[in-house]
């Protein structure tokens, strides 16, 4: 099996696992306990908080640990709307945002008599800044746009958007899940108000994520879970110390070699694209935009993605977000970029990771091209590279 679905999840790095194991068996005390063992666990949590914050360019005190980016998005968006004035409860969300963010915005609007409007994207998948500017008004409480799309890898210029949002008196929330550990993130320099991300996308464990927000903003947020007052009252419940330690270790490792790994993965991604298109015609979704170094989303005209996947069981890829893998509908991301339903259903995402080798890429490219050719022949299409 050749795994090319690292945007869905990543394996836990061996060094991350090594950091976590003692917390399960030796340093297992509750981090909220006041005795020595509990305080030792609390110190592990705070050390990890520093590592997690440092990776994305913010302060340790700004980080609130959650169960993942989905929970963090709900905490951020619902928390802002709950505290907003009645006349300022509109949320603007990028049309290509992850389903978790879209759902969080809808849930918050339903709960607090708000409204959600989608921001159009350009053909290349980047946010349409003119449309954002047109939508911004005095009733907007929050704008939510990801730094990088999980399906296409397209990168948005967050630093350019934030001033527009702040000039309108609104807050900016950024999903950095796909970007953290892959590209440079500078939350404080960009003046992002809230950010959400998960550990399992950067070789950490599943079940732990984070919300970043200033202390002043944290005080305005309404918690989703109440009880013991953990995480400064924003997220009650016993801390997942082992997961948090793993999150910190994964962040530290990512910071150490992010740039070198990005170069390596970009070279492999380009090789994969080149090898595939040397044999079969393929359209690059997100053409012209900056993209994550590890991601390429290709449309194979005349070859439905599900049929191509069936023909190449040795290569593990996705037709869209892993969270929507049971949804037979075409990708909302690609539809928002202007593709037709048929075109979206002919698209596959290939996302590489640290374990990916050049040998795997060369083998995978042959399997992919073979599968596309077989499906096109079955469907009576001729889109081989020789034909075009």
Image: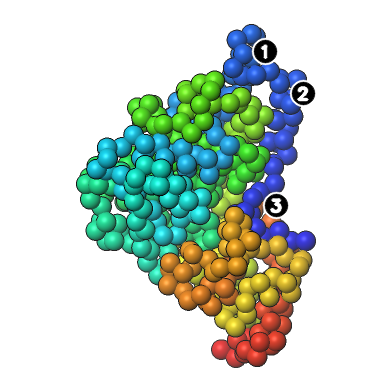
- 323 relative to 169, above or below: below
Residue beneath label 1, please?
Answer: 37
- Placement of the N terminus among the 4 image quadrants: bottom right
Q: Nearer the viewer, mark 3 or mark 1?
A: 1
Kind of element beneath mark 3: loop
Q: Is residue 385 left or right of residue 235?
A: right
Q: Could one spot residue 117 in this view of the protein? A: yes
N-terminal label among 3 and 1: 1
Specify the label residue 25 is tagged with.
2
Q: Secondary structure at mark 1?
A: helix
Task: Give the numbered dot on residue 183.
Answer: none
The answer to whether 41 appears left or right of 66 in the picture is right
- Relative to residue 101, is residue 193 depicted above or below? above
Q: Name the spot of residue 27 as percent of width and height, x first.
A: 71, 20
Q: Position of residue 56 (x, y in %)?
A: 47, 39
- The dot on residue 355 is 3
**Residue 155 in the image, given as x and y percentages of width and height:** 44, 56
Q: Is residue 207 left or right of residue 175?
A: right
Q: Earlier in the sequence, mark 2 or mark 1?
A: 2
Residue at x 45% of width, y 47% of height: 107
State how far apart marks 2 and 1 are (Cα): 13 Å
- 271 and 78: which is toward the camera: 78
Q: Nearer the viewer, residue 312 or 234?
A: 234
Q: Residue at x 48, y 63 (%)?
A: 333
């Amino acid at each position: 099996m050749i795994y090319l679905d690292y945007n869905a999840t990543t394996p836990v790095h061996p060094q991350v696992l090594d950091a976590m194991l003692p917390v399960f068996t030796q340093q297992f005390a509750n981090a909220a306990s006041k005795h020595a063992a509990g305080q030792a666990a609390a110190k592990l949590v705070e050390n990890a908080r520093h590592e997690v914050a440092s990776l994305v360019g913010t302060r340790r005190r700004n980080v609130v640990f959650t169960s993942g980016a989905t929970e963090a998005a709900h905490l951020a968006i619902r928390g802002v709307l709950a505290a907003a004035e009645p006349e300022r409860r509109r949320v603007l969300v990028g049309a290509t945002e992850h389903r978790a963010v879209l759902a969080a915005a809808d849930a918050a609007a339903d709960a607090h008599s708000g409204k959600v409007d989608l921001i159009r994207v350009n053909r290349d998948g980047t946010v349409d800044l003119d449309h954002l500017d047109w939508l911004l008004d005095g009733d907007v409480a929050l704008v939510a746009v990801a730094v990088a799309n999980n399906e296409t890898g397209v990168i948005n210029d967050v630093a350019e958007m934030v001033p527009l949002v702040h000039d309108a008196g609104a807050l900016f929330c950024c999903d950095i899940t796909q970007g953290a550990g892959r590209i440079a993130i500078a939350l404080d320099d960009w003046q992002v108000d809230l950010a959400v991300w998960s550990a399992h996308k950067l070789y950490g464990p599943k079940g732990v994520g984070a919300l970043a927000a200033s202390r002043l903003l944290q005080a305005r947020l309404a918690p989703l879970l109440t009880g013991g007052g953990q995480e400064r009252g924003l997220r009650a419940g016993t801390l997942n110390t082992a997961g948090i330690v793993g999150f910190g270790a994964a962040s530290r490792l990512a910071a150490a070699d992010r740039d070198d790994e990005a170069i390596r993965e970009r070279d492999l991604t380009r090789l994969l694209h080149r090898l595939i298109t040397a044999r079969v015609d393929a359209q690059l979704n997100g053409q012209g935009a900056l993209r994550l170094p590890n991601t390429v989303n290709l449309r194979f005209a005349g070859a439905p993605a599900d049929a191509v996947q069936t023909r190449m069981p040795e290569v593990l890829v996705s037709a869209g977000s892993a969270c929507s893998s049971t949804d037979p509908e075409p990708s909302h991301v690609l539809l928002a970029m202007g593709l037709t339903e048929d075109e979206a259903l002919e698209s596959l995402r290939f996302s590489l990771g640290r374990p990916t080798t050049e040998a795997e890429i060369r083998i995978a490219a042959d399997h992919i091209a073979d599968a596309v050719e077989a499906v096109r022949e079955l469907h009576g299409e001729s889109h081989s590279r020789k034909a075009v």
